[in-house]
Amino acid sequence: MPGMVVFGRRWGIATDDLVFPGVFELFIRIIWWIGILVLYTIHKGRFDCPGGAVLHSYLVVLLVLLAAIILSLCAIVYVSAQGTITNPGPRRSIPLLVCVRALLYLPELVWACLGAIWVSDDSRGCEPLGVGAVISAVVASWIILFFTGIGVLIVFDPLGSQRPSPALYEPGTRDLESSDSAQLLYTARSLAVRVWESRLRLLCCCLPQDDSHRAAFSGIAQLVSGFFSDTDLVPSDIAAGLSLLHQEQDKVEQCRDPDDVVPHSPSSPIREDLHTELERAAHCMRFAVAAYGWPMYVYSNPLTGVCKLSGDCCRSRSTEYDIVGGDHMGCHFTSILYSTGLQYRDFIYISFHNQIYEIPFFVALDHKKEAVLVAVRGTLSLRDVLTDLSADCENLPIEGVTGTCYAHKGISQAASYIYKKLMNDGILNQAFTIAPEYRLVITGHSLGAGTASVLAILLRSAFPTLQCYAFSPPGGLLSKALADYSREFVVSVVLGKDLVPRLSIPNMEDLKRRILKMVSNCNKPKYQILLRGCWYEMFGGEPDDFPTELPHGAGEPAGGGAEPAPCYTEEGCPRRSCFSQVRYRAEWSSEAAFSSVLISPRMITDHMPDVVLRALQSLTQHRPFSLCPSSLSNSHLNVI
């Protein structure tokens, strides 16, 4: 921070990011130089083959060239390790050193070509060891040059050549014509949007480039480019900031007194006890996992899944399978039957049709709980990712709800798609004709959880007794008016420090602010922060006492959030690490627990549907995970 400026442009790498790649290449070069030196010493005076004179000259020049490269790498590593993230002054000579190192690639390329020519033309009669050394040197040179090219492509910043005019930072800036400054800002933002849109198109090149996809690409590009437009962080700065923030959060949590346990749901004091709600949640989670189809079934049953499904996949289907849409081979439906334990006759409708804003779901009769159950699939394709990332606000007016009614655009459109299918195609009417005494239950995980929540709001007026169980729903889903309205019939279930339920735009802005504050206040070089952070994540230990902006003992900031949730407390080892296994307990939570992102090694794995299902089953079967000995006094609370 800021990005390194060399060759007249800014790159996606900082001047203190060259320590680790420099050390790695330095190690390779030193081993290489020692090997060539030993070979030259052994064969000194014995270069009597037809091409011996050329071989002698080749090895001598190669030793000199490697020595120059080693010296340049030593200088780069030493200078890059100086200063701090926000104090690049001691590293001002890095661009010059990088230019010197880049110039050394040219003679190395030439020498590799000459070595290849010598091996093919003049190596006959020379000792195999010398010929093998030249071949190894040529191959090693080409490998290093190849990976260097890959590295340049990775750190290339398409916006690097577009830097604000120096006049904007001079004292006379305020005299600049407002129209000129506005035009300059508009041009920079437009370029950033086009760059991000191109990246999305490249990433999703296998998807059709129709109007809906182009609109999604444009909206996502505007959102992402706007989020990063006011920072000059490179990826390693973010990694260092996350490491510092994780250790700071752990220090704060160790000093904090245990939170008071909420005895009942904050939205309804007369709701059934927590254990009853957990049993219902564990039951519904099986259907939410089943909605993922055969990929999740095989992932959850790696030894037996393929064998069980192979007998039913690809076989001829009778007309009774007309209720299944988008499942051409039948593997999805077969996996749902195995996962839920239901019979074919219990299913009303199954759709695996998948487009942007159109996600798979199924409707079944759950006789065990006397419910018509609608299960919505979570993210499993690039189209689903685009739906997730379409995070603009969309107006969702609901009769009887006062206040601003907004919802996540992509999820709201996905819920509207399912709502139209259920109502216009008569799917729910057919289900309640068969079982009129049943009640409606809607469930889903991740994207499916957000869609299920919005779908429940849309169906609430027609089905006043419906219930929704949303597992690991995405953050920033509903405005406060809609979240308050949904408290009575939507229950969110989140595990540990799952990241996804905290990914709202306000929380991400707060995370960006914290990262900037962390890296600004820390007086350690970045390579030390990253080394210490890796050790801390892998093997645990006590958090480093780096200067931060969070006072010890401070609680979580208050703020609006999603509907109340039974949340799971992860009780880790006192000296926690990524290898520490956990056990869980359940309790109710309030929206204040969703107001900031919590950093943890398990922040991604706690979102996985199979992990959530196992945690729920362990709680309802009175067999909590107790694989890591710890006491309640040393446990840390992860509320989502």
Image: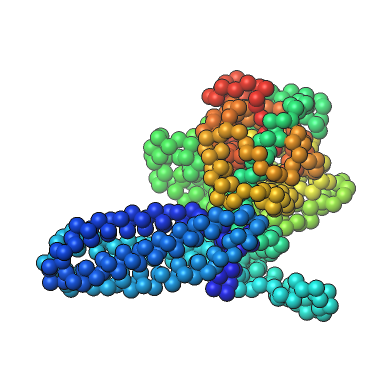
Q: Is residue 184 above or below residue 304?
A: below
Q: Position of residue 446 (x, y in %)?
A: 63, 44
Could you tell whether 563 is left or right of 583 in the image?
A: right
- Quick one: 275 or 559, which is closer to the camera? 559
Q: Quadrant of the N terminus?
A: bottom right
Q: What residue do we see at 69% from left, 52% from top?
A: 520
- Quick one: 265 or 581, which is closer to the camera? 581
Q: Position of residue 608 (x, y in %)?
A: 57, 40
Q: What residue do we see at 42% from left, 44% from top?
A: 313
Q: Position of residue 79 (x, y in %)?
A: 54, 59
- Quick one: 518 or 630, which is closer to the camera? 518
Q: Is residue 124 above or below residue 370?
A: below
Q: Is residue 549 above or below residue 136?
A: above
Q: Quadrant of the C terminus?
A: top right
Q: Position of residue 353 (x, y in %)?
A: 56, 53
The number of callouts visible is: 0
